[in-house]
Image (tube, helix red, strand yellow):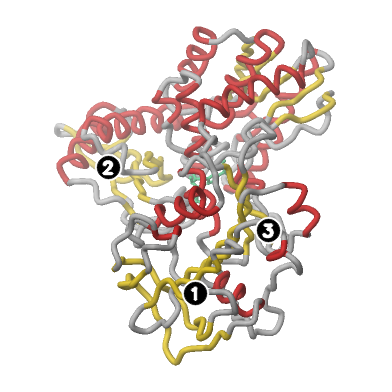
Amino acid sequence: MESKELILILDFGGQYNQLIARRVRECNVYSEVVPYDVSLEKIKEKNPKGIIFTGGPASVYGEDSPQCVDGIFELGIPVLGICYGMQLMSHTLGGKVLSADTREFGETSVSIDNTSPLFQGFESQNIFLMSHTDYVAEVPMGFAKIGFTSDCPHAAMENSEKKLYGIQFHPEVNNSVNGTQVIKNFLYNVCGCSGNWIMSSFVEDSIKSLKEKIGDKKALCALSGGVDSSVAAVLLSKAIGKNLTCIFVDHGLLRKNEGDEVEEIFTKNYDLNFVRVDAKNRFLEKLAGVTDPERKRKIIGEEFIRVFEAEAKKIGTVDFLVQGTIYPDVIESGHGKSAVIKSHHNVGGLPDYVDFKEIIEPLRSLFKDEVRKTGLELGIPENLVYRQPFPGPGLAIRVIGDITDDKLTILKDADAIFREEVANAGLHKNINQYFAVLTNLKSVGVIGDKRTYDYTVALRAVETTDFMTGVWSKIPYNVLEKVSTRIVNEVEHVNRVVYDITSKPPATIEWE
Ligand code: XMP
């Protein structure tokens, strides 16, 4: 692992920072995002093959604008500055940055010098996304102009001798045609990377180092059936086999048949100790009569830990606790603060009283798509690997108001029909999250000649990449019609189905 090539991405507060890291990894080079003020010692210690400065909202002349650490350009490590990163490079090395009267924004035709290693293989005109007000008016000494637009005199610059490059556009976004190739050229042509970051080698290396670290000691893993904990568990089982125990707390709030599916996958396919705890009654008792969404979350979070602890105690002392933490959960922002990723969302958390010596987070360096690739590498079934996100509190926050076993059954059946029809229509690949909600509303209906007074089920489907914002999915009417007909016909106590046509914001994805 230590020999892997690394690109350090210095975060100057731009909105696309994680995207840059992902693009680099798509080029098979490992990358990490670190705060812009990371010390020179730390950089040397990490020994990167190259450094990328991200964009950011600041102006180099602004008060408190983020600056680069002294001496960074003297390390002999290639640097690529993107947008603010380019302006900062220029400003620091003696060039001139000015503020334009108007902002240059959008897909822009950029003329480039394709004899530069950065633009090898490119046409002389290319469409890249520009988004800036400040611009480099004069490049520093030793630099040459290698790109311009009708509004921007220096859209790209290079100092080939020192391997310092700046680009005013954003190569990391999809709007920049062949933008990833610019990054790839930097990695391969300028930094001399060979591209040894591939998932199969990650799996191999991880298994080897986990074996060395754990030896014949014991590890414990809380398995939720979600992608991250499942991949972590399988990785560990390949490394230490029966010395791994997975505890799967079935809180009774999972989707239809989900508990059985998880159990089947893990007991049939892998050589590990699998403990399924049927804790449904415990959870439902604690939740009885509770209607407030945040209280539901809290109760479930706490109860989850209690159940996990009780089971862990039966096993005795374990040396290692395995967690499925992934990179976006640990990444630090440009201002040195850890990004808090919805702490209230992390049901399960860390049990305080479980007797273990060390935490192992084998997926700590991976993005979600890399976790999925790792899962496939490990032979985990595709339907688990591509499972849509499912909240820790499960169906508890999809039964609006108080939760009962009967309501859960209604919701599970309706939700299963919705998911089945979305899949039948081949829409599951485009819709990122879709589920049914049991509203607390009863309304009058008629079936045959009889009046009914039953529940309304709401369908929710969103398209999103980050789950922070999203738009409601335009599912074709014929699919919605089929789902609605099936639900009212097949699920008792439902006489009305509605479709949620609100995006996020202002609504959230879940109803509670
Ligand atoms: P919202 O409803 O906030 O959801 O728009 C955004 C994403 O987070 C998921 N979510 C949760 N996940 N525990 C979780 O593990 C929770 O309490 C929780 N609440 C929402 C939601 O499913 C969506 O993917």
Dot label at residue 462: none
Secondary structure of the residue carrying numbered label 1: strand
Q: Is residue 296 visible?
A: no
Q: Which residue is mark 2?
A: 496
CA separation, marks 2 and 1?
Answer: 67 Å
Question: Please, is residue 238 above or below residue 160 in the view?
Answer: above
Q: CA distance from mark 1 to mark 3?
A: 18 Å
Tag 3 residue:
76
> Ligand 1 within 8 A of label 3's CB?
no
Estimate the x, y position of residue 296 in percent, counting from the top left. 61, 42
Q: Is residue 394 left or right of residue 452?
A: right
| Location of the N terminus (image quadrant) | top right
How far, Cα to Cα, is label 3 from label 2?
67 Å
- Quarter of the image for residue 117 reads bottom left
Indicate which disc, 1 or 3, sits on the residue closer to the N terminus.
3
Residue receiving disc 1: 144
As displayed, is residue 70 above or below residue 267?
below
Local packing at callout 3 (Cα closer than 10 Å; few below 14, some 14-19, many 20+) is some
Tag 2, which secondary structure?
Answer: strand
